[in-house]
Amino acid sequence: KMISDSPSSLVHLLGRIWIAVCCVTVLSSQILFSKWYQGCRGIILQYVTIMLWIWESIQIFLMVDNEWTYIAYHALALSTCMSILYQVPF
């Protein structure tokens, strides 16, 4: 049975689908629009990173008892990751 009746398994399934969609979007933009992608890849990578971190924060919020502490750690990690991405010359 791939999907049980619990909401947490549905959240996990939607998480896997969301990550797959983000990865396919980035890969297809690299292949189909290579010239455009070379000019915009920094912005694309930043937005993909933000979306993945938001999704992960939502999953943690739904599944962990002490939600706000973990979300605060995620926000700190996201801020650090974004500051690193802004410094990297793409």
Image (tube, grey):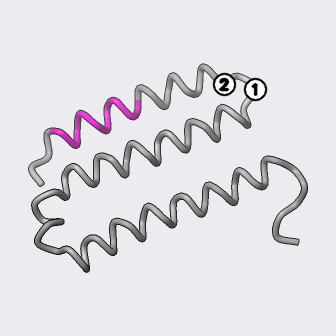
Q: Which amino acid type is shown beneath numbered disc 2?
A: Glu
Residue linked to disc 1: 65
Q: Position of residue 46 (x, y in %)?
A: 29, 46
Q: Residue furthest bottom?
A: 31
Q: Are marks 2 and 1 in contact (CB under 8 Å)?
A: yes
Q: Residue at x 54, y 44 (%)?
A: 55
Residue linked to disc 2: 67
The answer to whether 37 is drawn above or below residue 40 in the figure is below
The answer to whether 88 is drawn above or below residue 83 in the figure is below
Q: Residues within 10 Å of mark 2 (few under 14, many from 20)?
A: some
Magenta-span inclusion, residue 80: yes
Q: Which amino acid type is shown beneath numbered disc 1?
A: Asp
Disc 2 element: helix
The answer to whether 32 is drawn above or below residue 50 in the figure is below
Q: Position of residue 50 (x, y in %)?
A: 39, 42
- The tally of labels here is 2
Q: Quadrant of residue 40?
A: bottom left
Disc 1 element: loop
Q: Main secondary structure of the magenta part?
A: helix
Q: Nearer the viewer, residue 6 or 83?
A: 6
Residue 4 lies left or right of residue 17; in this view the side is: right
Q: Residue at x 75, y 26 (%)?
A: 65
Q: Where are the magenta residues, as a range? A: 77-86
Q: Nearer the viewer, residue 83 or 10?
A: 10
Residue 82 lies left or right of residue 41; in this view the side is: right
Q: Residue at x 87, y 50 (%)?
A: 6
Q: Residue at x 59, y 20 (%)?
A: 69
Image quadrant where one finds the C terminus = bottom left
Q: Residues within 10 Å of mark 1 (few under 14, many from 20)?
A: few
